[in-house]
């Protein structure tokens, strides 16, 4: 059996705001094995970025982790000091942020911004060693060596994003978290970047957490998928399995609202309504107000959200796991 | 970058011509004849009177006079000072300018650097008690009525505590049997400060390429130590050892004005730095820098403060002129016999040649300061630097 690289257990986090607590991450558990790619999908605002930030303890100051554990290679990350965390960041786990186009400091050369990270984690490297490595990485992601000496504003969006991938690889991480890395790019470039990520992941045998609101992209990229709704994971399982037989009606709704280009034509059904505000405490199933096929069980306010086994390595929330009647 | 610098330089020259013409016209527009005071001055010999009329072409039409003025300007011929006859304005300015330059540049460099440092730390410590208090203090010093504040400082530290001299730039008793004039000492001081700043700059430039941060820090520290050692050797050997005593006297007189102006002038920079840096801290690349595992200090200095510096420099460029104006006030209050006092005197005494010459030189000073700030801004912001290259 492959060792699991990342193990998240019962993670809960909220933001402390003037209006009250925003429960952005509620009791989330998942594992990522080494070499595996894991997808996190859900509407925007459901807490995906919050999960990603919490994994590296990069969350904003007003956030509070109330519970849970994050184990990387068996080592607990929650409770580590800032200096201990600095050693983990980028060295073991790197992140490609949402809106990674702005990930570059406008007044520092690209190469210098990459070397800066390498200096931190490989202090004994010579300048030439670092430069050679950057050139190698640039070649891998299809960039010219001269990019090192350029400033961010001289690059196109796609080039910047490729350079971000090179940056993410610069300290040989075991895991890359990609938070909507292609959202700001046009479709053609988007596809190139996706292929690039897939390619380097296979080449280097990295683990990947891929976050997106677009379930079609996740299908392309991942082995395992978790569907998030209002701060909770409502369904989790092998990607193929989840796509073939979604058990939660939210997953079903996401799939129904996504056009498939190659498959047969089908009528798109969009999901009505808004996701619930995360400030209010939600009793019972958080999805029930929008559920297109509610059962009597759904309206039961006392039912707790809990994942139950619905297939091989496939879990879905107990309140909604019966809603989908596979036609 | 070179093209940009050259372009800026020519712009500066054009502006300078405009400045000359307009300042001439302004003096020309002063009500009453500029000569009335000249005619009434019993100290002025008739040949000087005749010379002045000829030199300025005062009997010719306006446009010819402007022409003559500009030509004379480049010949360095401003006629004679009415009040200091037979000294020429150039002679007087050559004596006063180094004094102003010395005080002015040291004060502004210190004020700007302190302001930037304080602003940076304020933004970084956002929400802490010290941040609140320093911000309140900065707002106070930013809004305080400067002449009153300067007089209070003078009264307290100069009179009440008797720590510092009450103005002037030297103690005359110490200079009676001095082998040097104060000008010579000033030149020595200026050269010393310029050379050591330049060496400091070189140390930073040449250590930039050291890859290991630890080594870089060590080498810089070593460089700094040797610079101090070098300075110490300089002041203890040869002629400089004799000058040391007098230089120390001048330096001692500079402390209070420098401290006072810094207290007032740092606040604007500090508050602006604080605001821009708090904006910058929200930017995505700060998050990237944290994710990269960089140290807090490095994120603050290298990423946040470096970018926040740009608008601060812009605003500094715009305020250079008011800073120069302010130097008139500072020099009056601390009886610092520099350009500011010279101008004031010339205007009050209606010493037109001297006033015009000093205004032109202050104008040149302002333009050069502007030029340097502009070019260094382009150097700081690659977006301007690169654009100007293509
Ligand atoms: N710093 C913050 N303070 C308060 N609320 C926040 C903060 N950051 C995010 N949120 C809220 O937390 C929820 C989850 O946000 P996020 O994790 O960014 O979702 P996603 O990445 O899925 O779009 C949203 O409702 C958002 O408004
Ligand atoms: Mg997000």
Image (cartoon, coloured by chain):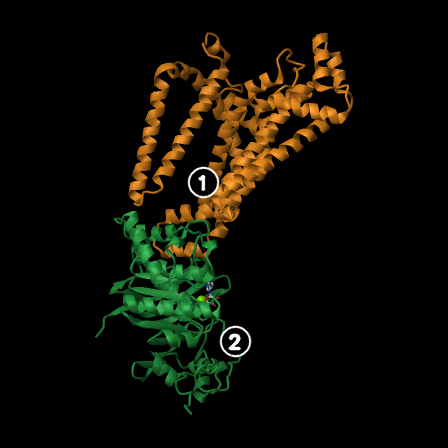
Chain colours: A green, B orange
Q: Nearer the viewer, residue B70 or B39?
A: B70
Badge 1 crowding class, 10 Å Cα cut-off, few under 14, some 14 to 19, many 20 or more, is some
Q: How far apart are the two marked residues, 1 and 2, measured between alpha carbons?
A: 47 Å
- Disc 2 target residue: A274
Badge 2 crowding class, 10 Å Cα cut-off, few under 14, some 14 to 19, many 20 or more, is few
Chain for disc number 1: B
From the viewer's perspective, tell me whether residue A119 is left or right of residue B125: left
Residue B304 visible in this rendered orientation of the protein:
yes
User: Residue A130 at x, y = what percent?
Assistant: 30, 52
User: Residue B237 at x, y = what percent?
Assistant: 34, 17
Q: Does mark 1 have its CB less than 8 Å from ligand 1?
A: no
Q: Secondary structure at mark 2?
A: loop
- Disc 1 target residue: B117
User: Residue B148 at x, y = what percent?
Assistant: 59, 29
Q: Which residue is drawn at the image coordinates 25% and 48% (left, top)?
A: A124
Does A142 appear above or below B233? below
Marks 1 and 2 belong to one chain: no
Q: Are marks 1 and 2 in contact (CB under 8 Å)?
A: no
């Amino acid at each position: 059996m492959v060792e699991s690289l990342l193990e998240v257990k019962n993670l809960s986090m909220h933001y402390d705001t003037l209006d009250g607590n925003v429960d952005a991450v509620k009791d989330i558990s998942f594992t990522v094995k080494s070499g595996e790619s894991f997808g996190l999908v859900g509407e925007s605002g459901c807490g995906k970025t919050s999960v990603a930030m919490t994994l590296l303890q990069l969350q904003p100051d007003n956030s509070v982790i109330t519970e849970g554990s994050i184990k990387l290679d068996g080592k607990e990350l929650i409770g580590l000091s800032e200096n201990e965390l600095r050693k983990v960041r980028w060295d073991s786990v790197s992140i490609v942020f949402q809106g990674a186009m702005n990930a570059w400091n406008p007044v520092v050369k690209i190469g210098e911004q990459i070397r800066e990270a390498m200096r931190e984690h490989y202090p004994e490297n010579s300048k030439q060693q670092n430069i050679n490595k950057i050139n190698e990485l640039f070649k891998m992601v299809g960039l010219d060596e001269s990019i090192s000496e350029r400033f961010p504003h001289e690059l196109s969006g796609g080039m910047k994003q490729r350079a971000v991938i090179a940056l993410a690889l610069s300290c040989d991480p075991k895991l890359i978290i990609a938070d909507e890395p292609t959202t700001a790019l046009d479709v053609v470039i988007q596809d190139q970047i996706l292929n690039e990520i897939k390619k380097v992941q296979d080449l280097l045998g990295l683990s990947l957490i891929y976050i997106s609101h677009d379930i079609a992209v996740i299908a392309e990229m991942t082995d395992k998928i978790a569907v998030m709704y209002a701060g909770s994971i409502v369904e989790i399982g092998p990607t193929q399995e989840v796509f073939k037989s979604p058990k939660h009606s939210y997953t079903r709704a996401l799939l129904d609202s996504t056009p498939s280009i190659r498959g047969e034509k089908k009528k798109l059904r969009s999901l009505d309504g808004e996701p619930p505000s995360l400030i209010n405490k939600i009793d019972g199933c958080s999805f029930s107000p929008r559920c297109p096929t509610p059962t009597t069980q759904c309206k039961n306010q006392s039912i707790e959200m809990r994942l139950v086994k619905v297939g091989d390595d496939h879990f879905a929330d107990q309140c909604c796991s019966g809603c989908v009647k596979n036609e | 970058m070179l093209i940009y610098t050259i372009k800026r330089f020519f712009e500066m020259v054009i502006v300078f011509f405009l400045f000359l013409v307009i300042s001439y016209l302004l003096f020309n527009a002063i009500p009453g004849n500029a000569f009335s005071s000249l005619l009434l001055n019993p100290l002025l010999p008739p040949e000087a009177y005749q010379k002045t009329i000829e030199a300025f072409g005062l009997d010719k039409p306006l446009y010819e006079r402007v022409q003559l003025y500009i030509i004379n300007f480049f010949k360095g011929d401003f006629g004679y000072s009415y009040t200091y006859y037979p000294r020429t304005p150039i002679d007087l300015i050559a004596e006063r300018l180094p004094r102003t330059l010395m005080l002015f540049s040291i004060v502004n460099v210190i004020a700007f650097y302190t302001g930037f440092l304080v602003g940076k730390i304020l933004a970084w410590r956002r929400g802490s008690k010290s941040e609140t208090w320093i911000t309140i203090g900065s707002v106070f010093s930013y809004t305080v009525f400067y002449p009153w504040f300067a007089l209070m400082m003078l009264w307290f530290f100069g009179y009440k505590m008797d720590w510092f001299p009450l103005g002037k730039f030297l103690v005359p008793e110490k200079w009676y049997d001095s082998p040097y004039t104060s000008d010579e000492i000033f030149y020595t001081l200026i050269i010393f400060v310029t050379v050591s700043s330049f060496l400091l700059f070189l140390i930073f430039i040449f250590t930039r390429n050291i890859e290991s941060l630890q080594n870089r820090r060590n080498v810089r520290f070593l460089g700094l130590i040797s610079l101090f050692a070098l300075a110490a050797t300089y002041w203890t050997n040869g002629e400089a050892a004799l000058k040391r005593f007098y230089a120390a006297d001048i330096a001692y007189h500079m402390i209070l004005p420098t401290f006072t102006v810094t207290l007032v002038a740092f606040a604007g920079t500090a508050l602006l730095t604080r605001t821009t840096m708090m904006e910058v801290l929200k930017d995505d690349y700060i998050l990237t820098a944290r994710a990269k595992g960089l140290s807090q200090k490095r994120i603050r200095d290298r990423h946040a403060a470096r970018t926040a510096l740009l608008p601060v420099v812009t605003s500094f460029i715009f305020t250079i002129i008011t800073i120069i104006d302010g130097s008139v006030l500072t020099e009056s209050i601390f009886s610092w016999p520099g350009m500011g006092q010279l101008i004031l005197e010339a205007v009050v005494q209606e010493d037109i040649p001297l006033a015009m010459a000093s205004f032109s030189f202050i104008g040149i000073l302002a333009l050069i300061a502007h030029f340097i700030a502009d070019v260094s801004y382009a150097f700081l912001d690659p977006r301007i630097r690169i654009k100007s290259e293509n």
